[in-house]
Image: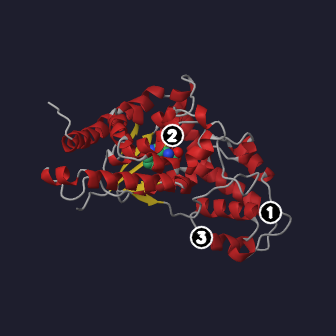
Amino acid sequence: MAFQQRVFSGVQPTGNLHLGNYLGAIVKFVALQQSHDCIYCVVDMHAITVWQDPVELPRATREVTAAFLACGIDPKKHIIFNQSQVAEHAELAWVFNCVARVGWLNRMTQFKEKAGKDRENASVGLYVYPNLMAADILVYRATHVPVGEDQKQHLELSRDIAQKFNNDFSASIAARGFGDAFFPQPEPLIQGPATRVMSLRDGTKKMSKSDPSDYSRINLTDDADAIAQKVRKAKTDPDALPSEAKGLEDRPEAENLVGIYAALKEVPAADVLGEFGGAQFSTFKSALVDLAVAKLGPIGAETKRLMGDPAYIDSVLADGSNRAREIAAQTMSAVKDIIGFIRH
Ligand code: TRP
């Protein structure tokens, strides 16, 4: 069965958005608007799988929304909303808790990393987090999911859940006229020059909101001075830049800065090396500061401006939630019929 193409993705409202989120995800969200119907969700229910301060959570939810808007996502042509306003996500997640197998979840590397040594004390929500993620995507029967590398395994689980649901209920699905599959197999969209933006302090670690050093990342709301300072202090090695990609091998910091420059400028890394091969890092960093300030400065400023108008942000989320709920409710009604739940 052919499914209508639809894009869905989610961003957690925890901590500040940084360059890694921007180049790894949001840039793609913006581009996909040209070719697809897109639904972008601020996943506040995923956020509470680890403790969130109830004063900080709404601020972070509004900030992700403001950043979506500032980066150029159109909330009229597409949908921007926060997950907790559409109850169908939680409802479908329960069904998926009963479809997914414990053995599948036990293989999830992100749970192991996040739960750490004290696994007994992790929330149950953190454990079933991938089932909620599958529900986010499949409640819209979305076909394409732009995500970072780290979410690939969760996407595979979503596909497994979709497939098992389709198999387990195949007779009921067919009897209701949905053919041989009710849910599509959602495809990850991972390509792009800088899917992995690394820490400015350690080129082998991902840029992360949880790194204790703010110098490890460029936040989307950093001003020009902060961007300049962080780029100038970024770790490098003593050699000049190479003129070919091979020369970046075993030089993770150099590779990262070149990758960031290429992604911000939207050119292949080879072009950047062609221009800066043989140059010292001081020269390259000055160019990177100018480029980063030119690209990110306006986004940061617009995000801050929007944060000054929380009523407007909340109205965007309310409108998006209403439109999302219409789609999600249709899926949920069909799912209830397929499973055999009585509804009036
Ligand atoms: N787990 C994703 C992350 O941490 C966020 C997320 C939640 C998501 N639901 C989703 C991403 C659905 C894509 C589709 O980055």
Residue 116 visible in the snapshot = yes
Residue 130, position as x, y percentages in the image: 46, 45
Are circles 1 and 3 on residues that touch, CB within 8 Å? no
* Residue that label 3 marks: 268
Residue 132, position as x, y percentages in the image: 42, 41
Element carrying mark 2: helix
Residue under the image location 53 percent in, 31 percent down:
307
* Residue that label 1 marks: 281
Q: Is mark 3 within 8 Å of ligand 1?
A: no
Residue 66 visible in the snapshot = no
Q: Residue furthest right?
A: 238
Distance between the Cα atoms at labels 3 and 2?
A: 39 Å
Which is nearer the eye, 279 or 26? Answer: 26
Instruction: Of the two numbered discs 1 and 3 on the same chain, state the one appearing first in sequence.
Output: 3
* Residue that label 2 marks: 127
Element carrying mark 3: loop
